Image: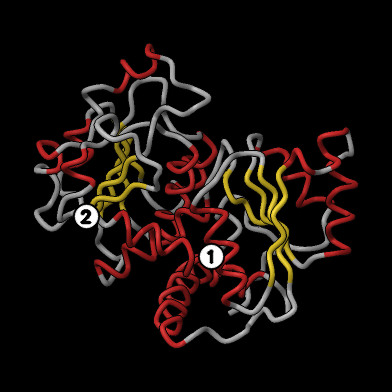
Amino acid sequence: MKLKTKDLLTLAELTPKEFTGLIDYSIKLKKESKNGNKPLLKNKTLTMIFQKPSTRTRVSFEVGMFQLGGHAVNLSSNEMQLSRGESIEDTAKTLSRYTDCIMARVYDHVLLEKLSLFSTIPVINGLSDSFHPCQILADFMTIKEKKGKFNGLKISWIGDGNNVCNSMIYGCALANIKLSIATPKGFEPDKTALKESKKSIDVELTTDPLQAIKNADVVVTDTYTSIHNNDPKRIKKFLPKYQVNQALMNHAKNNAIFMHCLPAKRDHEVTSFVIDGPQSVVWDEAENRLHSQKALLASIIRA
């Protein structure tokens, strides 16, 4: 399939048909991968820019390009002239002459917007402090595999209204899935994402995890600390109320699945019992980063 958008920065660039089409295409490529994918991106090159460290993003994009017959160039920001003062504008124009697509994992989302503005090739958000669209493609692929549908489902988000949550809002709007978000006061998701999504769906915001998780088909959380923000005062805002443990999971549907984008801080946002338990699909979810990103790359890089 081909996407009308040049770039993928938030998910808002996609139509519902394109979003669900990407999910189905991801599942198709996953099935085909058992026998080796066709070289859909032969002689194509992806530039990967990393300001933030990565395990899943780097490996899944690099392996994905290889499996599709292409090549990936990995660049940390410290290795680029960006670190010596070259502008984003000049960097974008230069990379556009060498490669076929840019994937960047950054702090400030504005950097991605500038890359997009000045590049003539597609720009993919591999993660920013504001959004993580590639994770949501993998998440919805996993949901479709496990539940067989989107219609009539309810997703419960427990914890921090962070970048993944912001993209989850767009994903639910595109797939027409009910979303209930429980966060501590002051940790709500992006207001613009909420406003735009309400054109398609009603998003429930609450401070009560029990209310959010009631009758949920899918329960999702993410870490609320990082190497950059591990403030004990912040942790107290979340623990123990917003921890996904078995007692909380018992309020979801009996066949509910648990998801986490990883890396997880065990026994903070989720207990080991839940993440390793029978309702957890986090390892399938992690694998699906590979397949969903292959679908994205094959759809956004012009042949």
List the residue tagged with mark 2.
257
x, y percent for residue 184: 33, 23
x, y percent for residue 296: 57, 68
Give the residue displayed 51% in from the left and 49% down from the top: 55
Dot 2, how many residues are within 10 Å of its Cα: few (below 14), some (14-19), or many (20+)?
Answer: many
**In the image, what residue type sits under mark 2?**
Ile
The one of 98 and 111 positioned closer to us in this rendering: 98
Label at residue 179: none
Give the residue displayed 49% in from the left and 85% down from the top: 36
Indicate left or right for 264 with 47 as reference.
left
In the figure, residue 149 lies in which quadrant? bottom left
For marks 2 and 1 on the same chain, the one whose residue lies earlier in the sequence: 2
Cβ atoms under marks 2 and 1 closer than 8 Å: no
Give the residue displayed 64% in from the left and 79% down from the top: 69
Label at residue 293: 1
Indicate left or right for 18 with 187 as reference.
right
Q: Residue furthest top?
A: 233
The one of 21 and 52 positioned closer to us in this rendering: 52
Give the residue displayed 65% in from the left and 56% down from the top: 124
Question: As displayed, is residue 189 above or below residue 234?
Answer: below
